[in-house]
Amino acid sequence: GGSLPLEGHVHTSIELFEPSTRTWTMFAHMRVPRKCFAVAVCEGRIYMMGGYRQLAHDKAEDSVECMDLVSRQGWELEPMGIERGGLAVGLLSVAPSGSAGQP
């Protein structure tokens, strides 16, 4: 995810960083283009939530998606219930939980 303002759009790409080789690898694409979103990794799955679909921060997302890091299979989860961009998440037990961010 993220954006390059000169390109004029928000990205869907998921890239993974390998610390041992200090390289980035293209992994998959999110269902929703996002920037300023939160990410959590838990039990072999990556969770992406909130953020903005547009370059302007005029409408935040409430959508949540999950992708299995082994199978690369992804699916949408229940929405957060309130739109958030620029949010942070933490893991409480094994379920990601969002906090703060801008409506």
Image: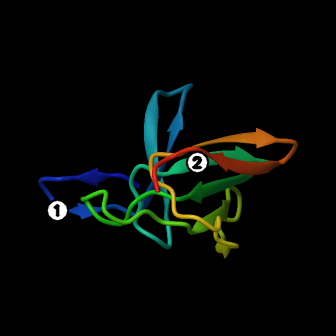
On the image, which quarter does residue 45 sit in? bottom right
Type of residue at label 2? Val
Closer to the chain start, of discs 2 and 1, is 1
Q: Assess disc 2: are there few (<14), some (14-19) or many (≥20) residues with their C-alpha within 10 Å of its C-alpha.
A: some
User: What residue would you read off at disc 2?
Assistant: 39
User: With respect to residue 42, does 18 lie above or below?
Assistant: above
Identity of the residue drawn at 52% across and 63% down: 83
User: Residue 28's x, y, as percent?
Assistant: 50, 62
Type of residue at label 1? Gly
Describe residue 78's horizontal placement relative to residue 22 as left or right. Answer: right
How far apart are labels 2 and 1 at the CA level? 23 Å
Near-viewer residue (91 or 43): 91
User: Residue 53's x, y, as percent?
Assistant: 36, 66
User: What residue would you read off at disc 1?
Assistant: 8
Identity of the residue drawn at 41% across and 60% down: 34
In what element is the residue under mark 1?
loop
The N terminus lies in quadrant:
bottom left
Identity of the residue drawn at 23% across and 64% down: 9
Near-viewer residue (91 or 80): 80
On the image, which quarter does residue 12 sit in? bottom left
**Extreme residue toward the front, this view:** 103
Describe residue 19's horizontal placement relative to residue 60 as left or right. Answer: right
Identity of the residue drawn at 35% across and 52% down: 2
Q: Assess disc 1: are there few (<14), some (14-19) or many (≥20) residues with their C-alpha within 10 Å of its C-alpha.
A: few
Residue 91 — which label? none
User: Residue 82's x, y, as percent?
Assistant: 58, 64
Describe residue 93's horizontal placement relative to residue 22 as left or right. Answer: right
